[in-house]
Amino acid sequence: MNSDVFAPWEDPQAKPLIQFRNVTKRFGDFTAIDDLSLDIFEREFFALLGPSGCGKTTMMRMLAGFEKPTEGRIILGGQDIDPIPPNKRAVNMMFQSYALFPHLSVRDNIAFGLRRDNMPKHDLEDRVEEMLRLTRLERFARRKPHQISGGQRQRVALARSLAKAPKLLLLDEPLGALDKKLRQDTQFELMDIQEKTGTTFVIVTHDQEEAMTVASRVAVMDQGKLMQVATPDKIYESPNSVYVADFIGDVNIIEGRATANGDETYQVDWAEGQAPLTATSATGFSNGQTCHLAIRPEKVTISVDRPADAINAVQGKVHDIAYLGNLSTYHVALPNGTIIKAQTANTRRISRRSFTWEDPVWLSWTATAAVLLVD
Amino acid sequence: MSRLSWFNTVSLTLGFAFLYIPMIILIIFSFNESKLVTVWAGFSTKWYGAVVQNEAFLDAAWVTVRVAVVSSTLATILGTAAAYVLVRGGRFFGRTLFSGMIYAPLVMPEVITGLSLLLLFIGIGLDRGIVTIVLAHTTFSMCFVSVVVSSRLVTFDQSLEEAALDLGCSPAQAFRLVTLPIIAPAVISGWLLAFTLSLDDLVIASFTSGPSATTLPIKIFSAVRLGVSPEINALSTIMIAVVTVGVITASLVTKRAMVRQKQDELAAAKTE
């Protein structure tokens, strides 16, 4: 492995493989994609993440050629792909329903695309064998799609779309039909295959955990617009809006007014009779500007006594406890009714837990733990 | 197995008697020695011998089979194409109107269809004969095919065709290599439907047939007008036998395919 971090998006010299240039897509009166520009680089595992109806599937279908942009251009490898029909594009897609051909065996499904290219018989057989090995399907080559399990079907669909060695592979909710455990295993398998083949993957998903696990970069979408495009850790740790913070993982949002208090540090007045909260922020706020303090539950410490050195500490009562086995999430009600969630790892047995329902507790966090957001 | 109550037994008996007694009588009297249809005079198969030697019947049967094969094949091609465009063609001007119009001939009285075709053939100066019967049967049976095929296409997963395009098929290849094999059962049952419709059509055929070509139903009908003969009974019994064998074979084949599919799915569930 290269010791350099893979980050072509930070290199101004790098040429993107795919460029969306001011792309708009309308279906009648409905705008599915709204003046969107985006660069995706070679060898990336790029995730389009958003709620259903946000336009992520439309983006993918435009790349595959099943939809044409109403305005703007899509450029793949330096070429405008608008006039190229789907069967002439060096792009393959793995469908959400897998779309396996029910009348063909697993082997013939995988060979289908290669046969269309009139690949010589010998090369074709080698390539199919290679794909069967890659997806561990050798034993099932002669079966029909309805004779294999859901997980195996998913692998056939992957093998079929990879067989033609496309420049770009599109995956539409590829793991949606699998149960949770199989999904997690398959995520790692996908990453493995992506690394081995060096293909650029674009995955559409509504599952934020899946996007975070597999992707090199994640684009969070809402109503046909990109909300944020960044690496999974940036999206999680420094979301640029309340929408992104709220969409990815669990978060507490406290609304207040910011007052500058030293270099990149602000005081947030958030409730009558409560001490202001302190948070650092690279984005500037003018005095008295409305802001949202976003803090992840796992960054909030819960304790019986007020920690002596805490910069931010509030007192409340345990309102609810969600026990997840490895973790517990405490819902703590503050005197003004606000609920703050705090998450702790259950490093001790549950019988030795120090607080329970209705116990008065302190919540505390550091100045750098929270993010200040405008909206 | 539970026993039927007396009420159910009576209903079942009455229902089936209603359906099958006429045919059973017909079959019994086809083996009648006597020339009189209603008087039983002993068992004989001589009328079957007479049918086989009757040139007129054999000619009519041969015309009927040829008409049925050609017209149902043409109807299947046209009906499938129409269904495909109406279900898959996307939105185009007048699509709803066309979709409605494809069903109209289903409810049109046959006399009107036959008459309008007769007027057309006279108008364009086409001599009535086997060609005009084929054209007429194609016309009225293609909408039946279209209905059968489009009901299959509606539930057809469109992403299968998209996958074929994505893997390098032209739209025509996608249809031939993916869509057609998958909808084949519907296309075949459409063909069978058109075939049987053509086999037993009397009204439209009598409008469009000419002196050069007579179909079996027309032949039987005109023979019966001169009096029912045991020969007609024998001919009808042969037709019943052919249809019965056909239906039983078709249902056995379908049943076996279904059983196999079930076993495959069970096997798949076990490997999961």
Image (cartoon, coloured by chain):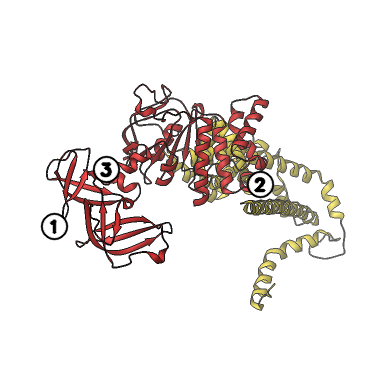
Chain colours: A red, B yellow
Q: Position of residue B28 (x, y in %)?
A: 80, 62
Q: CA distance from mark 3 to mark 1?
A: 25 Å
User: Could you tell me which chain the residue with mark 1 belongs to?
Assistant: A
Image check: A97 left or right of A217?
right
Q: Judge depth for marks 2 and 1 and give the one in front.
A: 1
Amino acid carrying mark 2 in the image: Leu
Callout 1 crowding tier (Cα within 10 Å): few <14, some 14–19, many ≥20: few
The quadrant of the image that shows the N terminus of chain B is bottom right
Residue sitting nearer the eye, A367 or B56: A367
Q: Nearer the viewer, residue A63 or B127?
A: A63
Please tell me which residue is depicted at 47% across the width and 38% down the height of the picture. Answer: A171
Judging from the image, what secondary structure is the residue with disc 2 in? helix
Judging depth in this view, the residue of B161 and A263 nearest the camera is: A263
Which tag, 3 or 1, sits closer to the chain's start?
3
Q: Residue at x 41, y 60 (%)?
A: A348
Distance Cα–Cα, label 3 vs label 2? 63 Å
Q: For mark 1, what is the residue? A: A272
Q: Secondary structure at mark 1?
A: loop
In screen coordinates, is B232 left or right of A132?
right
- Residue wearing tag 3: A241
Answer whether labels 3 and 1 touch (C-beta < 8 Å).
no
Looking at the rendered image, the disc whose residue lies closer to the viewer, 3 or 1, is 1
Q: Nearer the viewer, mark 3 or mark 2?
A: 3
